[in-house]
Amino acid sequence: MFITFEGPEGSGKSTQIPVLADFLRQRGYSVLTTREPGGTEIGEQIRGVIHDLKNTAMHPRTETLLYQAARAQIVEQVIRPHLAAGGIVLCDRYADSTIAYQGYGHQQNLDEVRRLVGYATEGLNPDVTLLLDLEVETGLGRKTDGEWNRLDAYAVEFHQRVRGGYHQLALEEPQRWVTIDASQTPEAVAEIICKNVIARL
């Protein structure tokens, strides 16, 4: 099973993934956790370029293409092999992030962005996508304590378009998406996640 975590900045994805991974491993599942962009040596190098605060001149198309390069690498090198071996993959962000951020956030042509995503993933879609939903200002406020990158520094209006994009994606595929109120305590969010995932398994 391929499970992805999505959400606005500061929604708690990196907090919840290890919790779910431990929960599943205790039940005998082979679990791989990874992240986008990154998860491979090549992907981590690309992540550094995308997130570097010095790269303010980066065009949205450049940003979009770099994400697809990192994604193509992790799909072939990490995600597909683990799924083929019968394991569960938990990924911190995936293709839906590109639709939400580079599509809705940057207001690029959604059809073109989707085509690029399809090329990068060769049609590999998640079985379940957990959307940790949170008010934009709350999430950005949480981020001040951790990694602050080039995308975090975009205007609040950009992040509001991203959140709206996530809501639209969840409406389009309700069978895949599980929307969770991420303003709850981490323990409450974790309980909802684990119940939803074990029910699917």
Image (cartoon, rainbow, N blue to C red):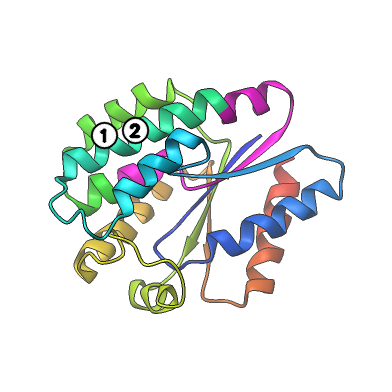
**Amino acid under disc 1:** Leu
**198 lies above or below 164:** above
Q: Which image quadrant for residue 173?
A: top left
Q: Is residue 189 left or right of residue 146?
A: right
Report the front residue among 32 and 124.
32
Highlighted magenta segment, given as a residue range: 78-100
Counting other residues with Cα less than 10 Å from the Cα at mark 2, is it few (<14), some (14-19), or many (20 or more)? Answer: many
**Quarter containing the C terminus:** top right
Which mark is on residue 68?
A: 2
- The residue at 39%/62% (across/down) is 8
Q: Is residue 63 left or right of residue 181?
A: left
**Quarter containing the N terminus:** top right
Which mark is on residue 79?
A: none
**98 lies above or below 10:** above
Q: Please say if the residues under marks 2 and 1 sit with CB atoms less than 8 Å apart.
A: yes
Picture coordinates of residue 144, whole percent (x, y): 40, 77
- The residue at 60%/64% (across/down) is 15
**Amino acid under disc 2:** Gln
- Residue 58 forms part of the magenta stretch: no
**SS class of the residue under badge 2?**
helix
Counting other residues with Cα less than 10 Å from the Cα at mark 1, is it few (<14), some (14-19), or many (20 or more)? Answer: some
Picture coordinates of residue 192, whole percent (x, y): 67, 62
Which mark is on residue 65?
A: 1
**113 lies above or below 108:** above
Can the viewer see residue 172? no
- The residue at 43%/26% (across/down) is 121
Picture coordinates of residue 175, whole percent (x, y): 54, 41
